[in-house]
Amino acid sequence: MLKVKVGVFDSGVGGLSVVKAIQKELPDLEIVYKDDAGHVPYGTRSIEEIYSFVKPIFQSFVDEGCKVIVIACNTVTTNLASRLRTEFPVPMVGMEPMVKPAAAATKTKVIAVCATPRTLESERYQWLKDKFAKGMKVLEPDCSDWTRMIENNSVDRERIAKIVNSVCESGADQIVLGCTHYHWIEQLIKSLASGRAEVIQPEVPVIEQLKRVLKQLA
């Protein structure tokens, strides 16, 4: 029996954490992982530039027989998912900042979203805030150098601690990891925020959505 092929895309190494999570939960899938390490980070590039990088990669997923594409990149999901869905014949599962669950869980009415500049500027992210976090304080610390740190395996614990301490001291009790690269330092962020804030990221709901999509295809 042929395994169902699922494409997983991210700009760099961030998406590998998503691949691991999918493989653990759905070991029977054949995962085709592609990144764009030559152009990482995406978070400070223009949308049209990102689109020009992503479109041929998505075409290659389709050409190779992938039945679903997981967009393991918040920057691409929030800025380009709707456009890509109109251009390719396969369903896509995107990853975007978990504003909704963070807003539902906060007791202080203050949440922090750690994401790339391009994600934070996207219409989709603005919609998520307006829809689910109205009347709340949403902190958006400058994490623009985190992706490069992680890609280069040169994580500066003190710089990350400064941001985590800052948002916690400002009252945030929910910290949203809105970039898959940041999943690699999730445990560090959790230890820094311990007792002060919950740290959340979307791997579990994304896998649940992938299961639903696969069920519909069966």
Image (spheres, grey):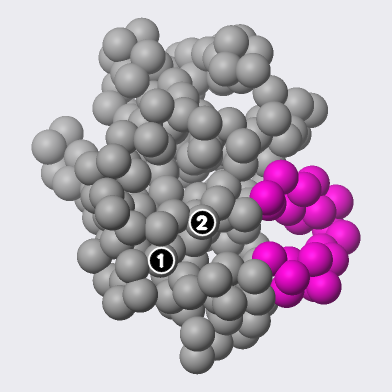
Tag 1, which secondary structure?
Answer: strand
Q: Between residue 135 and residue 64, name the one nearer to us.
A: 135
Q: Quadrant of the C terminus?
A: top left
Judged from the image, the secondary structure of the residue bearing numbered disc 2 is strand
- Location of the N terminus by quadrant is top left
Magenta part of the chain:
142-163
Q: Image quadrant of residue 141?
A: bottom right
The residue at 23%/43% (across/down) is 131
Asked if one can make out residue 41 in the rendered structure from this viewpoint, the answer is: yes
Residue type highlighted by circle 1: Val
Location of residue 51 (image quadrant): top right
Q: Using the image as rendered, state which of residue 151 and residue 108 is in the foreground.
A: 108
Which residue carries the number 2 mark? Answer: 139
| Residue 55 in the image, given as x and y percentages of width and height | 53, 13
Q: Which amino acid does label 2 sit on?
A: Leu
Q: Label 1: which residue?
A: 110
